Image (cartoon, rainbow, N blue to C red):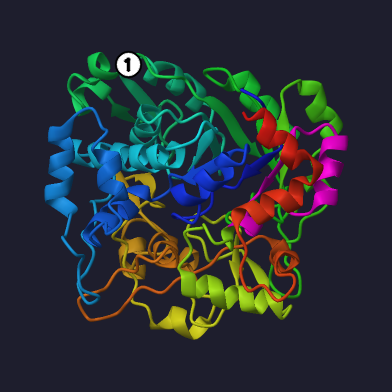
Protein backbone atom coordinates (compact mmCIF):
# COMPACT_ATOMS: atom_id res chain seq x y z
CA UNK A 1 0.00 0.00 0.00
CA UNK A 2 1.34 3.41 -0.98
CA UNK A 3 1.58 5.48 2.19
CA UNK A 4 -0.77 8.48 2.13
CA UNK A 5 0.55 11.88 3.15
CA UNK A 6 -2.84 12.81 4.54
CA UNK A 7 -5.13 10.75 6.78
CA UNK A 8 -8.59 12.12 7.44
CA UNK A 9 -9.44 11.77 11.12
CA UNK A 10 -11.97 9.19 12.26
CA UNK A 11 -14.38 11.49 14.06
CA UNK A 12 -17.66 11.09 15.61
CA UNK A 13 -20.36 9.21 15.92
CA UNK A 14 -20.82 9.43 12.10
CA UNK A 15 -19.06 12.76 11.57
CA UNK A 16 -16.50 10.79 9.58
CA UNK A 17 -19.20 9.00 7.67
CA UNK A 18 -18.90 7.14 4.38
CA UNK A 19 -19.45 10.26 2.25
CA UNK A 20 -16.49 12.06 3.80
CA UNK A 21 -14.22 9.02 3.69
CA UNK A 22 -15.14 8.37 0.06
CA UNK A 23 -14.40 11.97 -0.91
CA UNK A 24 -10.94 11.87 0.66
CA UNK A 25 -10.07 8.39 -0.62
CA UNK A 26 -11.12 9.35 -4.13
CA UNK A 27 -8.47 12.09 -3.97
CA UNK A 28 -5.66 9.62 -3.32
CA UNK A 29 -5.45 9.96 0.46
CA UNK A 30 -6.70 7.82 3.36
CA UNK A 31 -10.37 8.41 4.04
CA UNK A 32 -11.55 7.02 7.38
CA UNK A 33 -15.01 6.08 8.60
CA UNK A 34 -15.84 6.13 12.29
CA UNK A 35 -17.04 2.79 13.63
CA UNK A 36 -17.99 4.24 17.02
CA UNK A 37 -21.70 3.87 17.67
CA UNK A 38 -22.30 2.96 14.02
CA UNK A 39 -24.91 0.29 14.86
CA UNK A 40 -27.14 3.05 16.27
CA UNK A 41 -26.58 5.18 13.14
CA UNK A 42 -27.27 2.24 10.84
CA UNK A 43 -30.57 1.48 12.56
CA UNK A 44 -31.51 5.17 12.55
CA UNK A 45 -30.85 5.60 8.83
CA UNK A 46 -33.22 2.71 8.15
CA UNK A 47 -35.78 4.08 10.61
CA UNK A 48 -35.57 7.42 8.79
CA UNK A 49 -36.58 5.59 5.62
CA UNK A 50 -33.18 5.36 3.91
CA UNK A 51 -34.58 7.86 1.40
CA UNK A 52 -31.42 7.81 -0.73
CA UNK A 53 -31.48 4.03 -0.85
CA UNK A 54 -27.74 3.86 -0.10
CA UNK A 55 -28.00 1.64 2.97
CA UNK A 56 -30.26 -0.89 1.24
CA UNK A 57 -28.07 -0.87 -1.88
CA UNK A 58 -25.03 -1.72 0.24
CA UNK A 59 -26.98 -4.41 2.08
CA UNK A 60 -28.04 -5.95 -1.23
CA UNK A 61 -24.38 -6.81 -1.84
CA UNK A 62 -24.04 -8.74 1.43
CA UNK A 63 -23.55 -12.48 0.99
CA UNK A 64 -26.45 -13.61 3.21
CA UNK A 65 -29.70 -11.96 2.02
CA UNK A 66 -31.87 -13.68 4.62
CA UNK A 67 -29.98 -11.93 7.45
CA UNK A 68 -30.24 -8.63 5.58
CA UNK A 69 -33.99 -9.11 5.44
CA UNK A 70 -34.17 -9.46 9.22
CA UNK A 71 -32.48 -6.04 9.50
CA UNK A 72 -34.96 -4.51 7.08
CA UNK A 73 -37.88 -6.06 8.92
CA UNK A 74 -36.63 -4.80 12.28
CA UNK A 75 -35.61 -1.22 11.45
CA UNK A 76 -36.77 -0.05 8.04
CA UNK A 77 -39.63 2.45 8.05
CA UNK A 78 -40.92 3.36 4.55
CA UNK A 79 -40.83 7.16 4.09
CA UNK A 80 -39.26 7.49 7.55
CA UNK A 81 -40.51 7.94 11.10
CA UNK A 82 -42.22 11.12 12.29
CA UNK A 83 -40.21 13.76 14.16
CA UNK A 84 -41.98 12.87 17.40
CA UNK A 85 -41.41 9.10 17.13
CA UNK A 86 -38.39 7.63 18.97
CA UNK A 87 -35.71 5.84 16.97
CA UNK A 88 -35.59 2.07 17.12
CA UNK A 89 -32.20 1.31 18.64
CA UNK A 90 -30.15 -1.86 19.17
CA UNK A 91 -29.77 -3.11 22.74
CA UNK A 92 -26.59 -2.35 24.68
CA UNK A 93 -23.68 -4.76 24.52
CA UNK A 94 -22.80 -7.22 27.28
CA UNK A 95 -20.18 -9.95 27.52
CA UNK A 96 -22.73 -12.37 26.04
CA UNK A 97 -24.44 -10.33 23.34
CA UNK A 98 -27.44 -11.74 21.48
CA UNK A 99 -26.59 -13.05 18.02
CA UNK A 100 -28.75 -10.41 16.39
CA UNK A 101 -26.74 -7.60 18.01
CA UNK A 102 -23.47 -8.92 16.58
CA UNK A 103 -25.17 -9.18 13.20
CA UNK A 104 -26.43 -5.59 13.38
CA UNK A 105 -23.00 -4.32 14.42
CA UNK A 106 -21.15 -6.23 11.72
CA UNK A 107 -23.59 -5.17 9.01
CA UNK A 108 -23.47 -1.54 10.13
CA UNK A 109 -19.69 -1.51 9.70
CA UNK A 110 -19.97 -3.44 6.44
CA UNK A 111 -22.36 -0.85 5.00
CA UNK A 112 -20.21 2.10 6.07
CA UNK A 113 -17.02 0.68 4.54
CA UNK A 114 -18.79 -0.64 1.43
CA UNK A 115 -20.23 2.79 0.63
CA UNK A 116 -16.92 4.53 1.36
CA UNK A 117 -15.08 2.23 -1.07
CA UNK A 118 -17.72 2.23 -3.79
CA UNK A 119 -16.78 3.66 -7.18
CA UNK A 120 -13.04 4.33 -6.78
CA UNK A 121 -9.75 2.50 -6.18
CA UNK A 122 -8.58 4.47 -3.14
CA UNK A 123 -7.91 3.12 0.34
CA UNK A 124 -10.39 3.36 3.20
CA UNK A 125 -9.79 2.98 6.93
CA UNK A 126 -11.99 2.54 9.95
CA UNK A 127 -11.43 4.17 13.34
CA UNK A 128 -12.38 2.40 16.56
CA UNK A 129 -11.79 3.11 20.25
CA UNK A 130 -10.10 0.74 22.69
CA UNK A 131 -12.37 2.28 25.34
CA UNK A 132 -15.40 0.87 23.48
CA UNK A 133 -14.42 -2.78 23.67
CA UNK A 134 -17.50 -4.98 23.45
CA UNK A 135 -18.61 -4.14 19.87
CA UNK A 136 -15.02 -4.33 18.55
CA UNK A 137 -14.96 -7.91 17.24
CA UNK A 138 -18.20 -7.63 15.27
CA UNK A 139 -17.15 -4.17 14.04
CA UNK A 140 -13.81 -5.40 12.72
CA UNK A 141 -15.34 -8.40 11.01
CA UNK A 142 -18.04 -6.37 9.30
CA UNK A 143 -15.49 -3.83 8.06
CA UNK A 144 -13.25 -6.63 6.77
CA UNK A 145 -16.14 -8.23 4.90
CA UNK A 146 -16.39 -4.93 3.00
CA UNK A 147 -12.64 -4.89 2.28
CA UNK A 148 -11.43 -2.23 4.70
CA UNK A 149 -7.77 -1.37 4.05
CA UNK A 150 -6.64 0.09 7.38
CA UNK A 151 -7.74 -0.15 11.01
CA UNK A 152 -6.93 2.79 13.28
CA UNK A 153 -7.44 2.52 17.02
CA UNK A 154 -6.72 4.75 20.00
CA UNK A 155 -8.08 5.65 23.45
CA UNK A 156 -6.13 2.87 25.13
CA UNK A 157 -3.46 0.24 24.45
CA UNK A 158 -4.82 -2.02 21.68
CA UNK A 159 -2.38 -4.93 22.00
CA UNK A 160 -4.92 -7.56 20.89
CA UNK A 161 -6.15 -6.05 17.64
CA UNK A 162 -3.37 -7.10 15.26
CA UNK A 163 -3.70 -10.77 16.20
CA UNK A 164 -7.48 -10.59 15.94
CA UNK A 165 -7.18 -9.19 12.42
CA UNK A 166 -4.98 -12.15 11.47
CA UNK A 167 -7.61 -14.63 12.67
CA UNK A 168 -10.65 -12.84 11.30
CA UNK A 169 -9.10 -12.81 7.84
CA UNK A 170 -9.51 -16.60 7.91
CA UNK A 171 -12.95 -16.43 9.60
CA UNK A 172 -11.55 -18.00 12.77
CA UNK A 173 -13.31 -17.62 16.14
CA UNK A 174 -11.76 -14.83 18.22
CA UNK A 175 -12.00 -13.48 21.74
CA UNK A 176 -11.18 -10.12 23.27
CA UNK A 177 -9.96 -9.60 26.83
CA UNK A 178 -11.98 -6.78 28.33
CA UNK A 179 -11.06 -4.40 31.11
CA UNK A 180 -12.99 -5.05 34.32
CA UNK A 181 -12.79 -2.66 37.26
CA UNK A 182 -11.99 -4.52 40.48
CA UNK A 183 -10.86 -7.70 38.73
CA UNK A 184 -8.18 -9.86 40.31
CA UNK A 185 -4.81 -10.29 38.64
CA UNK A 186 -5.63 -13.79 37.41
CA UNK A 187 -9.15 -12.97 36.23
CA UNK A 188 -9.66 -13.31 32.49
CA UNK A 189 -12.88 -11.83 31.18
CA UNK A 190 -13.55 -12.04 27.44
CA UNK A 191 -16.14 -11.40 24.81
CA UNK A 192 -16.25 -13.99 22.02
CA UNK A 193 -17.09 -13.81 18.32
CA UNK A 194 -17.39 -16.76 15.95
CA UNK A 195 -17.95 -15.64 12.33
CA UNK A 196 -19.48 -18.94 11.29
CA UNK A 197 -21.91 -18.88 14.19
CA UNK A 198 -22.99 -15.30 13.55
CA UNK A 199 -23.10 -15.68 9.76
CA UNK A 200 -23.51 -19.41 8.90
CA UNK A 201 -21.70 -20.39 5.70
CA UNK A 202 -19.99 -17.01 5.28
CA UNK A 203 -16.44 -18.34 4.84
CA UNK A 204 -17.36 -20.49 1.83
CA UNK A 205 -19.33 -17.66 0.25
CA UNK A 206 -16.65 -14.96 0.45
CA UNK A 207 -13.35 -16.85 0.87
CA UNK A 208 -10.32 -15.56 2.74
CA UNK A 209 -10.48 -11.88 3.66
CA UNK A 210 -7.81 -9.23 3.21
CA UNK A 211 -5.99 -8.51 6.44
CA UNK A 212 -6.03 -4.71 6.84
CA UNK A 213 -3.04 -2.70 7.98
CA UNK A 214 -3.11 -1.74 11.65
CA UNK A 215 -2.21 1.78 12.83
CA UNK A 216 -2.57 2.35 16.59
CA UNK A 217 -3.10 5.94 17.73
CA UNK A 218 -0.61 6.78 20.47
CA UNK A 219 0.55 9.72 22.55
CA UNK A 220 4.07 8.61 23.58
CA UNK A 221 7.13 6.69 22.44
CA UNK A 222 6.74 4.44 25.48
CA UNK A 223 3.31 3.39 24.26
CA UNK A 224 4.65 2.71 20.76
CA UNK A 225 7.40 0.52 22.19
CA UNK A 226 4.92 -1.32 24.43
CA UNK A 227 2.67 -2.04 21.48
CA UNK A 228 5.50 -3.45 19.40
CA UNK A 229 6.62 -5.63 22.29
CA UNK A 230 3.21 -6.81 23.47
CA UNK A 231 1.11 -6.79 20.32
CA UNK A 232 -0.30 -10.19 19.39
CA UNK A 233 0.29 -9.52 15.68
CA UNK A 234 2.15 -7.11 13.44
CA UNK A 235 1.77 -3.34 13.83
CA UNK A 236 2.16 -1.45 10.55
CA UNK A 237 2.72 2.10 11.78
CA UNK A 238 1.53 4.70 14.27
CA UNK A 239 -0.49 7.87 14.46
CA UNK A 240 0.97 10.18 17.09
CA UNK A 241 -1.83 12.33 18.47
CA UNK A 242 -1.06 15.42 20.50
CA UNK A 243 -3.28 17.04 23.16
CA UNK A 244 -4.56 19.69 20.74
CA UNK A 245 -6.54 17.08 18.77
CA UNK A 246 -10.32 16.94 19.05
CA UNK A 247 -12.34 14.29 20.83
CA UNK A 248 -10.77 12.37 23.69
CA UNK A 249 -7.22 13.29 24.66
CA UNK A 250 -4.75 11.23 26.63
CA UNK A 251 -4.45 12.71 30.15
CA UNK A 252 -1.29 14.72 30.87
CA UNK A 253 1.62 12.59 31.99
CA UNK A 254 2.30 13.04 35.68
CA UNK A 255 0.19 15.12 38.05
CA UNK A 256 -2.87 16.74 36.47
CA UNK A 257 -3.05 20.50 36.96
CA UNK A 258 -5.70 22.84 35.55
CA UNK A 259 -5.31 26.29 34.03
CA UNK A 260 -7.44 29.30 34.94
CA UNK A 261 -10.21 28.07 32.59
CA UNK A 262 -10.28 24.65 34.24
CA UNK A 263 -8.51 22.78 31.43
CA UNK A 264 -5.75 20.18 31.93
CA UNK A 265 -2.24 21.59 31.49
CA UNK A 266 0.10 19.67 29.19
CA UNK A 267 3.88 20.10 29.35
CA UNK A 268 7.19 18.87 28.00
CA UNK A 269 6.52 15.31 29.17
CA UNK A 270 3.63 15.16 26.72
CA UNK A 271 5.78 16.03 23.68
CA UNK A 272 6.74 12.94 21.66
CA UNK A 273 10.42 12.49 20.81
CA UNK A 274 10.29 12.10 17.02
CA UNK A 275 13.91 10.98 16.80
CA UNK A 276 13.07 7.98 18.98
CA UNK A 277 10.00 7.34 16.83
CA UNK A 278 12.19 7.28 13.73
CA UNK A 279 14.44 4.74 15.41
CA UNK A 280 11.50 2.35 15.80
CA UNK A 281 11.53 2.01 12.03
CA UNK A 282 7.80 2.07 11.28
CA UNK A 283 5.97 4.86 9.43
CA UNK A 284 4.16 7.40 11.57
CA UNK A 285 1.78 10.29 11.06
CA UNK A 286 1.39 13.35 13.29
CA UNK A 287 -2.05 14.46 14.48
CA UNK A 288 -3.41 17.38 16.46
CA UNK A 289 -2.95 20.88 15.05
CA UNK A 290 -1.52 19.98 11.64
CA UNK A 291 -4.17 21.62 9.48
CA UNK A 292 -1.76 23.91 7.63
CA UNK A 293 0.57 23.31 4.63
CA UNK A 294 3.62 24.52 6.55
CA UNK A 295 2.90 22.03 9.32
CA UNK A 296 2.47 19.26 6.78
CA UNK A 297 5.88 20.03 5.30
CA UNK A 298 7.44 20.32 8.77
CA UNK A 299 6.07 16.88 9.62
CA UNK A 300 7.57 15.38 6.48
CA UNK A 301 10.89 17.08 7.26
CA UNK A 302 10.78 15.56 10.75
CA UNK A 303 10.55 12.07 9.27
CA UNK A 304 6.80 11.53 9.41
CA UNK A 305 4.99 9.84 6.53
CA UNK A 306 2.41 12.61 6.76
CA UNK A 307 -0.29 13.99 9.01
CA UNK A 308 -3.77 13.14 10.24
CA UNK A 309 -6.27 16.00 10.13
CA UNK A 310 -9.71 15.98 11.70
CA UNK A 311 -11.06 19.43 12.52
CA UNK A 312 -10.82 20.85 9.00
CA UNK A 313 -12.69 17.86 7.61
CA UNK A 314 -15.33 17.89 10.35
CA UNK A 315 -16.75 21.14 8.99
CA UNK A 316 -16.51 20.42 5.27
CA UNK A 317 -19.53 19.83 3.06
CA UNK A 318 -19.20 16.04 3.09
CA UNK A 319 -18.92 15.53 6.86
CA UNK A 320 -21.78 13.89 8.72
CA UNK A 321 -22.38 16.77 11.14
CA UNK A 322 -25.93 18.09 11.19
CA UNK A 323 -25.98 20.80 8.47
CA UNK A 324 -27.50 23.49 10.67
CA UNK A 325 -24.92 22.93 13.42
CA UNK A 326 -22.15 23.02 10.84
CA UNK A 327 -23.47 26.26 9.36
CA UNK A 328 -23.68 28.00 12.74
CA UNK A 329 -20.24 26.84 13.85
CA UNK A 330 -18.69 27.92 10.54
CA UNK A 331 -20.22 31.35 11.03
CA UNK A 332 -18.46 31.63 14.41
CA UNK A 333 -15.25 30.51 12.71
CA UNK A 334 -15.69 33.15 10.01
CA UNK A 335 -16.16 35.84 12.66
CA UNK A 336 -13.14 34.51 14.61
CA UNK A 337 -15.39 33.83 17.59
CA UNK A 338 -14.94 30.06 17.70
CA UNK A 339 -13.75 28.59 21.03
CA UNK A 340 -12.88 25.11 22.24
CA UNK A 341 -12.82 24.01 25.87
CA UNK A 342 -10.88 20.93 26.99
CA UNK A 343 -13.15 19.55 29.67
CA UNK A 344 -11.67 17.22 32.30
CA UNK A 345 -15.19 16.13 33.34
CA UNK A 346 -17.65 15.91 30.44
CA UNK A 347 -16.66 12.43 29.25
CA UNK A 348 -17.79 9.48 31.40
CA UNK A 349 -14.47 7.82 30.56
CA UNK A 350 -12.55 10.29 32.71
CA UNK A 351 -10.37 11.28 29.74
CA UNK A 352 -10.17 14.97 28.79
CA UNK A 353 -12.63 15.77 26.00
CA UNK A 354 -12.68 18.84 23.77
CA UNK A 355 -15.99 20.67 23.37
CA UNK A 356 -16.67 23.40 20.79
CA UNK A 357 -18.64 26.23 22.37
CA UNK A 358 -21.90 26.81 20.48
CA UNK A 359 -25.29 28.05 21.55
CA UNK A 360 -27.99 25.39 21.55
CA UNK A 361 -25.60 22.56 22.35
CA UNK A 362 -24.53 20.81 25.55
CA UNK A 363 -21.64 23.28 25.85
CA UNK A 364 -24.24 25.47 27.59
CA UNK A 365 -24.59 24.53 31.31
CA UNK A 366 -28.30 25.37 31.39
CA UNK A 367 -29.03 22.87 28.60
CA UNK A 368 -26.97 20.25 30.40
CA UNK A 369 -29.04 20.76 33.55
CA UNK A 370 -32.33 20.29 31.65
CA UNK A 371 -31.50 16.71 30.63
CA UNK A 372 -32.70 13.76 32.70
CA UNK A 373 -29.91 11.22 32.97
CA UNK A 374 -30.40 8.01 31.04
CA UNK A 375 -27.99 5.37 29.71
CA UNK A 376 -29.68 3.44 26.90
CA UNK A 377 -26.87 3.08 24.36
CA UNK A 378 -24.11 2.04 26.73
CA UNK A 379 -21.08 2.26 24.44
CA UNK A 380 -18.98 3.96 27.14
CA UNK A 381 -20.11 1.82 30.07
CA UNK A 382 -17.34 0.23 32.10
CA UNK A 383 -17.41 -3.34 33.36
CA UNK A 384 -16.90 -3.95 37.07
CA UNK A 385 -16.68 -7.01 39.28
CA UNK A 386 -19.60 -7.22 41.67
CA UNK A 387 -19.35 -8.55 45.21
CA UNK A 388 -20.94 -11.81 44.07
CA UNK A 389 -18.18 -12.21 41.47
CA UNK A 390 -20.44 -11.52 38.51
CA UNK A 391 -19.90 -8.72 35.99
CA UNK A 392 -21.85 -5.47 36.22
CA UNK A 393 -22.08 -2.47 33.90
CA UNK A 394 -22.12 1.18 34.89
CA UNK A 395 -21.55 4.62 33.39
CA UNK A 396 -20.70 7.86 35.17
CA UNK A 397 -23.33 9.59 33.02
CA UNK A 398 -26.21 7.32 34.04
CA UNK A 399 -28.69 8.29 36.82
CA UNK A 400 -26.60 9.11 39.88
CA UNK A 401 -28.44 6.78 42.28
CA UNK A 402 -28.02 3.87 39.86
CA UNK A 403 -24.32 4.57 39.50
CA UNK A 404 -23.75 4.72 43.26
CA UNK A 405 -25.75 1.51 43.84
CA UNK A 406 -23.34 -0.19 41.44
CA UNK A 407 -20.33 0.83 43.52
CA UNK A 408 -19.49 4.10 41.81
CA UNK A 409 -18.72 7.26 43.76
CA UNK A 410 -20.94 10.28 43.37
CA UNK A 411 -17.98 12.58 42.67
CA UNK A 412 -17.40 10.77 39.38
CA UNK A 413 -20.84 11.78 38.10
CA UNK A 414 -20.34 15.56 38.34
CA UNK A 415 -20.86 17.29 34.97
CA UNK A 416 -20.61 14.00 33.06
CA UNK A 417 -22.38 14.11 29.71
CA UNK A 418 -24.01 11.27 27.79
CA UNK A 419 -21.63 11.42 24.85
CA UNK A 420 -23.32 8.40 23.22
CA UNK A 421 -26.63 10.23 22.81
CA UNK A 422 -25.19 13.73 22.46
CA UNK A 423 -22.75 12.86 19.67
CA UNK A 424 -25.43 10.87 17.85
CA UNK A 425 -27.60 13.99 17.94
CA UNK A 426 -24.71 15.98 16.45
CA UNK A 427 -24.83 13.66 13.44
CA UNK A 428 -28.54 14.40 12.98
CA UNK A 429 -30.12 11.44 14.79
CA UNK A 430 -31.37 12.86 18.12
CA UNK A 431 -33.43 10.48 20.21
CA UNK A 432 -36.93 11.58 21.22
CA UNK A 433 -37.96 10.62 24.75
CA UNK A 434 -41.42 9.57 25.94
CA UNK A 435 -41.83 12.93 27.70
CA UNK A 436 -41.05 14.81 24.48
CA UNK A 437 -37.47 15.70 25.38
CA UNK A 438 -35.15 15.66 22.36
CA UNK A 439 -31.51 14.77 22.95
CA UNK A 440 -29.24 17.77 22.37
CA UNK A 441 -25.94 17.77 20.45
CA UNK A 442 -22.40 18.25 21.67
CA UNK A 443 -19.64 19.15 19.19
CA UNK A 444 -16.04 18.14 19.61
CA UNK A 445 -13.21 19.88 17.78
CA UNK A 446 -9.47 20.34 17.93
CA UNK A 447 -7.86 23.46 19.34
CA UNK A 448 -7.22 24.71 15.80
CA UNK A 449 -10.95 25.15 15.09
CA UNK A 450 -10.43 28.81 14.29
CA UNK A 451 -7.98 27.87 11.53
CA UNK A 452 -10.89 26.52 9.47
CA UNK A 453 -11.31 30.16 8.49
CA UNK A 454 -8.49 29.65 5.98
CA UNK A 455 -10.97 27.72 3.81
CA UNK A 456 -13.60 30.48 3.88
CA UNK A 457 -11.87 32.86 1.49
CA UNK A 458 -13.51 35.25 -0.98
CA UNK A 459 -16.82 35.30 0.83
CA UNK A 460 -17.30 31.53 0.94
CA UNK A 461 -19.57 30.19 3.68
CA UNK A 462 -18.66 26.52 3.20
CA UNK A 463 -15.95 24.35 1.68
CA UNK A 464 -15.38 20.81 0.42
CA UNK A 465 -13.11 17.93 1.37
CA UNK A 466 -11.24 18.55 -1.88
CA UNK A 467 -10.60 22.13 -0.79
CA UNK A 468 -8.94 20.78 2.36
CA UNK A 469 -6.82 18.21 0.52
CA UNK A 470 -5.70 20.68 -2.17
CA UNK A 471 -4.79 23.31 0.40
CA UNK A 472 -2.90 21.04 2.79
CA UNK A 473 -0.95 19.05 0.22
CA UNK A 474 -0.23 21.80 -2.30
CA UNK A 475 2.27 20.40 -4.83
CA UNK A 476 1.76 16.87 -3.49
CA UNK A 477 -1.93 16.91 -4.48
CA UNK A 478 -1.51 16.47 -8.24
CA UNK A 479 1.18 13.88 -7.65
CA UNK A 480 -1.16 11.94 -5.36
CA UNK A 481 -3.92 11.92 -7.95
CA UNK A 482 -1.59 10.71 -10.67
CA UNK A 483 0.06 7.93 -8.69
CA UNK A 484 -3.10 6.85 -6.85
CA UNK A 485 -2.76 4.59 -3.83
Q: Nearer the viewer, residue 414 or 485?
A: 485
Residue at mark 1: 172
Residue 182 seen in render: no
Residue at 24% x, 13% y: name it: 204
Q: Quadrant of residue 6?
A: top right
Q: Position of residue 468 (x, y in %)?
A: 68, 54
Q: Quadrant of residue 76?
A: bottom left
Left or right: where 197 falls relative to 364: left
Q: Quadrant of the N terminus?
A: top right
Which residue range is magenta in the image? Answer: 291-313
Q: Is residue 27 above or below residue 372?
A: above
Q: Position of residue 269 (x, y in %)?
A: 81, 46
Q: Is residue 382 above or below residue 170?
A: below
Left or right: where 294 falls relative to 226: right
Residue at 40% x, 62% y: name it: 424
Q: Is residue 91 above or below residue 96?
A: below
Left or right: where 201 falls relative to 4: left
Residue 100 seen in render: yes
Amino acid sequence: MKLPKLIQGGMGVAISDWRLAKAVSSLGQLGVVSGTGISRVFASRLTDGDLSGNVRRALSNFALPEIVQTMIDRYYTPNGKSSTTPYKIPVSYSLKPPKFLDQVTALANYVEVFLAKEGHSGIVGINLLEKVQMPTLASLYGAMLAGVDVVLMGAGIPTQIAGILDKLSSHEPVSYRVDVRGAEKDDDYRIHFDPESIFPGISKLVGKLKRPKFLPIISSVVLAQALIKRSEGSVDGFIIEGPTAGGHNAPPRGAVNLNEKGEPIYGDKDVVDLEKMRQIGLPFWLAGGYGNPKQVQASLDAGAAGVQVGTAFSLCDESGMDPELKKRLLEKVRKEEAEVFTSPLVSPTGFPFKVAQLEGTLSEPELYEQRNRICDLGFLRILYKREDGKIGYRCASEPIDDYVKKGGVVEDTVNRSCLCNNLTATAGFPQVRKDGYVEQPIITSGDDLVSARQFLTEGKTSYSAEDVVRFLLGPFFKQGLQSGV
